[in-house]
Amino acid sequence: MSQDERERAELAALEREIVDCRRCPRLVAWRELVAREKRAAFADQEYWGRPIPGFGDPRARVMIFGLAPAAHGANRTGRVFTGDRSGDFLFAALHRTGFANQPVSLHAGDGLALHDAWISAAVRCAPPANKPTPAERDSCLPYSLRELALLADVRVIVCLGLFAWDAALRLLAARGASSVPRPRPPFGHGVELEIRSRPPSPLLLGCFHPSQQNTFTGKLTAPMIDGVLLRARAAAGL
């Protein structure tokens, strides 16, 4: 087995472990309740109702790091940022900036492929009111740590929102970056943070989350997210 095949097999094994996870009782109860009761618009669909693994190019040099799955988005479709307005905004931007082969992500098996990008989330289950607890965030941290170790080419992590920014700082600290500044640098759109460490830590880039609250009010526009993603391309040497 080649190194590439071994890494893909290890990513697949991690994905299976994530999908079977039941560590957080509150999240398990909520994701399964939503999957049973459903939203009226999706009443005829079978919901995924389980944790959401990462998705993308195993040789990615850019990781997109979100907050958590949406109750009627990824928790329904089974793929991160798929099936809701936030994902519509994000994948359109990934297509414009050369990371995705198509501008929409509808469901697994829709032909979507990512190039040099991997999408993941700090918390893998849909949380009530879209608000994970610190304990739930920390419970998912080992999965992100193993995932990043397997994605050996990642040079940049784009953090979608404050929660993802804080989680990414914790991730790099857990990975062994002893020079994470204290107090931790504040999140902001377009903020960059380079942490010196051995092995080298990915550059962190801040981006407002593509939630409807941000995109409908103009807090995050298409040119703004495109700018961050294009900066990520340049910083990753793409």
Image (cartoon, rainbow, N blue to C red):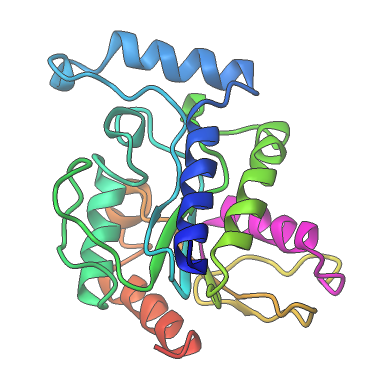
21 shown above or below 228: above
Q: Main secondary structure of the magenta part?
A: helix
Q: Nearer the viewer, residue 150 or 6?
A: 6
The answer to whether one can see residue 59 in this image is: yes
Residue 238 is left or right of residue 108, and the answer is right
Residue 191 is left or right of residue 41, and the answer is right
Residue 220 is left or right of residue 20, and the answer is left
41 shown above or below 151: above
Q: Which residues are magenta?
A: 158-180
Q: Nearer the viewer, residue 228 or 224?
A: 228
Q: Nearer the viewer, residue 128 or 145?
A: 145
Q: Residue at x 78, y 57 (%)?
A: 174
Residue 81 is left or right of residue 2, and the answer is left
- Residue 7 picture location, percent across and down: 51, 60
73 shown above or below 171: above
Query: Can you say which quadrant of the picture contains the C terminus?
Result: bottom left
